[in-house]
Amino acid sequence: MLRTTNATDVYSTIVTAHAANLLAKKLKMQTEDESKNLDKLEMTSERKGQIEDLMEEIINKANTSDPGSRFWDTERKLSKWGYYYTSSEAVEMTAYNVMSFVLRDEVPKALDSVKWLARQRNSQGGFVSTQDTVVALQALSMYAQRVTRIPLDMTVDVTEKHETVNKLNTFTMNEKNSLLLQTQKLTKLPSKLVLDTSGAGCAMVQTVLRYNMPEVQEDNGFTITAQGNTNTVDDPSLTICAAYTGTEEKTGMVLIEVELVTGWEAVSPESLKNEVDSGVQRVEQDDKENKVVLYFDSMPKEEKCINLELKQVMDIDDAKQALVTVYDYNNSKESASVLYSLN
């Protein structure tokens, strides 16, 4: 595996290095505990040298353009509004390297990457997509387990400054409430926040800004339409058409989430996988949320249409419209949504 690694593919190189470091750690534990057996694998000097060379190459490819940060990305993504945003691949690759450093007992080397990861979290505690969120949280957890040696006993005073100075709150943190999320709203914007800490331990402070837009933004990266076909009782359906309109040559994995109108259900959505022209690779059906999720390997720039068979299970007066959303799995900022109704 190490011999065939393509160094030009940064993502594959990082994942391979993480797998190799994980195996090396398990083999080291095996020598300390003879009850474990990994099929008599050995970490030879040659393999150790290959891992060292691989890690050195990975470190040399790190992006250190932000002071105090170290992360990995294939390329910086520029939005249509002119700002750079974090890609799912960047979060995932950086998280894998944090875990590699921890496995190699090189925890200090992970610090700048951990700080960068912490700044990428959204207001709900996640990251860009489901996959990178899982990997990033695992990396932060592994790092925290290694560095958390000082008992938590800390207070944080939060003060906002504008025309006046206003002390908002004093957060008290200890071992009993260390996993508890504590929040405080500001009274006015713009404000300057001042944090004063005392005690011992480690805590993270995150600010979240939410606001409403007077008008809906234009579709970003995709177009989508949804048309209900309920004129015939025998064969009602929903026709969904989508296309990629972004700046990249092609997309990665794309999802279409179809929320169903109350009183209606999808009929055998799995059958879409058998339709050659549909492009559907996987189907998930959430009966509780009355939603169908369709997975595509990619979405072409030419419009692609699918026909989802439906059946009415309950007659609902004045049923509300439902939402259909298309988005890039690795870049949820590229998405488009449309409401539809079934009469």
Image: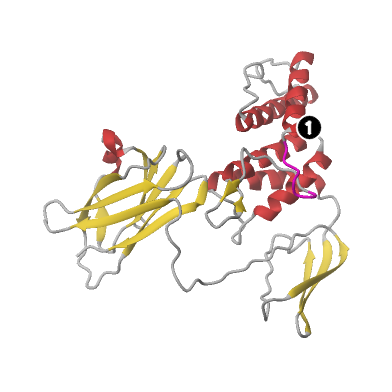
Q: Mark 1 points at which residue?
A: 104
Vertical order, 211 against 248 (above or below):
below
- Looking at the image, residue 198 sits to the left or right of residue 171; the answer is right
- Badge 1 marks a residue whose secondary structure is loop
Residue 257 drawn at (x, y percent): 38, 52
- Looking at the image, residue 217 sits to the left or right of residue 223; the answer is right
Mark 1 neighbour class, 10 Å CA radius: few under 14, some 14 to 19, many 20 or more: some
Q: Quadrant of residue 110?
A: top right
Residue 160 drawn at (x, y percent): 76, 77
User: Residue visible at 62% across and 17% down?
Assistant: 4
Image: magenta residue range: 62-68
Residue 107 drawn at (x, y percent): 81, 40
Outermost residue to the right: 199
> Where's the N terminus, which quadrant?
top right
What secondary structure is the stretch in magenta mostly built from? loop
Outermost residue to the bottom: 164
Q: In which quarter of the image is residue 228?
A: bottom left
User: Residue visible at 69% across and 49% down?
Assistant: 117
> Where's the C terminus, which quadrant?
bottom left
User: Residue visible at 81% across and 35% down?
Assistant: 105
Check the image and tell me how it is coloured. Answer: secondary structure
Under mark 1, the amino acid is: Arg
- Looking at the image, residue 294 sits to the left or right of residue 78; the answer is left
Q: Quadrant of residue 173?
A: bottom right
Vertical order, 266 against 342 (above or below):
above
Q: Residue 44 in magenta?
A: no
Residue 203 drawn at (x, y percent): 77, 60
User: Residue visible at 28% across and 40% down?
Assistant: 272
Q: How many labels does the image show?
A: 1
Nearer to me, 276 or 83 = 83
Q: Residue 66 in magenta?
A: yes
